Image (cartoon, rainbow, N blue to C red):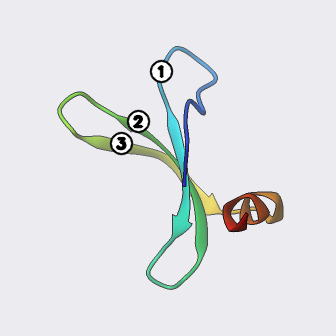
């Protein structure tokens, strides 16, 4: 599940909620550059509210 424009400034950031290899639900903020390169800004376990959003 992708949440578009998680940015608080002029940089276009996206956020995604998904599962890792160990079935942990993560919330990851990233930037996608024009050359198809992705830079991860942050990654953390999803909160209870984000988990509910993901499951519904």
Please identify the residue farthest to the left as the structure is shown.
Answer: 35
Counting residues from the start of the chain, the first of labels 2 and 1 encountered is 1
Q: Residues within 10 Å of mark 1 (few under 14, many from 20)?
A: few
Q: Which residue is mark 3?
A: 39
Counting residues from the start of the chain, the first of labels 3 and 2 encountered is 2
Residue at 56% from the left image edge and 30% from the top image edge: 5
User: For this view, does 30 lie left or right of residue 47?
Assistant: left
User: For this view, does 39 lie left or right of residue 46?
Assistant: left
User: Judging from the image, what secondary structure is the residue with disc 3 in?
Assistant: strand
Counting from the top left corner in percent of width and height, residue 55 is at 70, 68
Q: Which residue is mark 2?
A: 31
Spatial CA distance of label 3 from label 2 is: 5 Å
Say if mark 3 contacts mark 2, CB within 8 Å.
yes
Counting from the top left corner in percent of width and height, residue 14 is at 50, 38
Counting residues from the start of the chain, the first of labels 1 and 3 encountered is 1
Q: Which residue is mark 1?
A: 11
Spatial CA distance of label 1 from label 3 is: 12 Å
């Amino acid at each position: 599940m992708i949440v578009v424009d998680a940015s608080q400034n002029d940089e276009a950031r996206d956020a995604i909620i998904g599962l890792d290899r160990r079935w942990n639900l993560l919330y990851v903020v990233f930037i996608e550059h024009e050359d198809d390169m992705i830079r991860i800004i942050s990654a953390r376990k999803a909160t209870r509210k984000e988990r509910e959003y993901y499951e519904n």
